Image: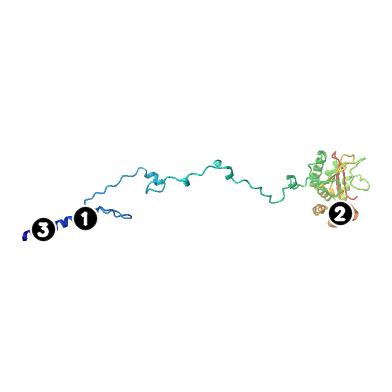
Amino acid sequence: MLDLRYALRVAAAAASLLSFATAALAFSQIDPGEGGEPTAKEGIIAVPLPPLDDAPEREAQGNVEGPQPEPGPADEPAPAAADQPAEAVPPAGPAAPPAGPPAPPAHELQEPASPSGAAAIGTAEPVRYGEDELPRPVRDLRRKLMEIARTGEVEKLRPYLETGAEPTVLTFGDTPDDPIAYLKEASGDGEGAELLAILLEILESGYAHAEAGSDAEIYIWPYFVQANLEALTLSQKVELFELVTAGDYEAMKSFGAYNFYRAGISPEGRLEFFVAGD
């Protein structure tokens, strides 16, 4: 009887050990779950799974956890503008009003490029500058007289001072026998240099084209000879004061005309006068 009880206890203990071993083996094969790495157990070989065929495509899409959902209506591309109904495009609104008054024509925006155009001086003849509008004989003589004036040698004027029945007017008195001797005597320095300086100054100023188309046609420097001195602008007064003083200007207004030196050249290129007074 004692042996039978002992044998039953041994059998029960063996069965209990076998059950515990089986449970331990099953527990070692359970995945630890998310966030953990499986722990290798003795006697168990871990075999890696082969990569999925569509893994690169899903990685490019930023999701390798599973297949992508089918595109729905919200994922479909919007139709092109040409496919949209006409009412979907808003009609153009009215043009914006201009920011200011319309710009004037281009010719009204242009400033006078240089003193070569005409300007009003309170007289019928406009003011002109430079030589662009001068006839060639007038232009050539003007250039020559200015060249001589710059040398300071009054004797070089002799070939251009007419004598005889229609002499170049140098004075409102008697015609001098020797025009060069007269110019030297009338010049403040006694050598004619002062008068050459005056000749240069007036030929560099603006001029008037008087009596155009008639036998008396002439080009006159400075234009003040033909101007209304009471109507001069400030800028024109500056031009005048390059030739005379403000005191001279007041005296001229009292006299009623410009009475300083002036020069006149005919259309044929003849020096008609170089004279002061009136």
Residue 230 circle label: 2
Around disc 2, counting alpha carbons within 10 Å, would you say few (fewer than 14), some (14 to 19), or many (20 or more)?
some
Check residue 243 in the rendering and tell me which mark sits there, or answer none.
Answer: none
Horizontal side, residue 88 vs residue 31: left or right: right
Q: Could you say where residue 47 lies in the image, as x and y percent from the top left? A: 27, 47
Q: Which amino acid does label 1 sit on?
A: Ala
Q: In this view, does 259 lie above or below 142?
A: below
Q: Reading the chain from its start, which is encountered first: label 2 or label 1?
A: 1
Pick the front one: 159 or 9:
9
Q: Which of 188 and 268 is in front in this view?
A: 268
Q: Name the residue under label 1.
A: 23
In the foreground, 233 or 141: 233
Q: Mark 3 points at which residue?
A: 8
Q: In this view, does 261 lie to the left or right of 28?
A: right
Residue 8 rendering spot, x and y as whole percentages = 10, 58
Q: How crowded is mark 1: few (under 14 residues within 10 Å), some or many (20 or more)?
A: few
- Report whether 11 appears left or right of 252: left
- What number of labels is visible? 3
Outermost residue on the bottom side: it is 2
Q: Which amino acid does label 3 sit on?
A: Leu
Q: What residue type is labelled 2?
A: Glu
Q: Which residue sits at x=90%, y=54%? A: 255
Q: What element carries label 3?
A: helix
- Looking at the picture, how far across and down is residue 190, in whole percent? 85, 51
**Quarter placement of the N terminus:** bottom left
When asked about the image quadrant of residue 145, the answer is: top right
Mark 2–mark 3 distance (CA, rounded to whole Å):
153 Å
- In the picture, measured across the screen, residue 73 lies left or right of residue 267, that is left
Q: How far apart are marks 3 and 1 (CA)?
A: 23 Å
Color encoding of the figure: rainbow
For numbered disc 2, what is the local secondary structure? helix
10 Å neighbourhood of mark 3: few (<14), some, or many (≥20)? few
